[in-house]
Image: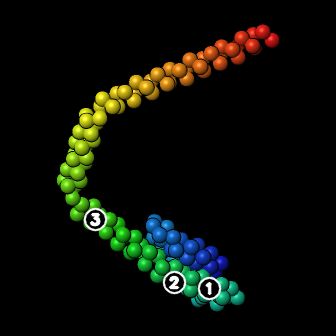
Amino acid sequence: MEIAALVLGIISLVCSLIAGPLSFIGSLLAIIGIILGALGLKSGTEKASKAKAGLIMSIIALVLGIIMSLACLVCIGATVSAIEEMDWEGMEQGIEDSVDKLEQEFEENWEELGLEFEQLDEFMKSIEEGFQSDVDKALDSLTNI
């Protein structure tokens, strides 16, 4: 029982230091460690010092676990509150305005873009033809071997 209290004290202390669900689990383990540590101290065996160390670590872990769990709950509440207060209609209007502006710019520059697309298409065709001729040469040299 004393060694179990010590082990649970160590594990609960580590879990309590990590934010999130582990801090809650660390608190539960700390409660078990406190119970086992108290029972180990009452037994009066030579391992009472281990029970005392487990009890102390479990108490510290319980306090830290409660603090970390509350901190997580506060953060979740703040996030939910911030999401609720967001101006979704304003964001939607801003996106619509940006799309309209992009459409206008595209329409104004379409002729210029059309030329660039044609030049790019010709360039890609020339690369493709050059690549194909290189592949044909490589295949011819392989068949001659």
Of label 3 and label 2, which has the lower sequence position? 2
Q: Disc 3 on helix, strand or loop?
A: helix
Q: Residue furthest right?
A: 145
Callout 3 amino acid: Ala
Residues tagged 1 and 3 counted as in contact (Cβ below 8 A): no
Quarter of the rendering occupied by the C terminus: top right
- Label annotation for residue 82: 3
Along the viewing direction, whichever of 62 and 83 lies nearer the viewer: 83
The residue that disc 1 covers is 53
Callout 2 amino acid: Ile
61 sits to left or right of 67: right
The residue that disc 2 covers is 59
Image point (33%, 31%), residue name:
112
Along the viewing direction, whichever of 17 and 142 lies nearer the viewer: 142
Whole-number angstrom distance, CA of label 3 to CA of label 2: 35 Å
Dividing the picture into quarters, in which one does residue 70 lie?
bottom left
Residues tagged 3 and 2 counted as in contact (Cβ below 8 A): no
93 sits to left or right of 57: left
Image position, residue 53 (x, y; %): 62, 85
Q: Disc 2 on helix, strand or loop?
A: helix
Of label 2 and label 1, which has the lower sequence position? 1
Q: Callout 3: 10 Å neighbours few (<14), some, many (20+)?
A: few
Residues tagged 2 and 1 counted as in contact (Cβ below 8 A): no
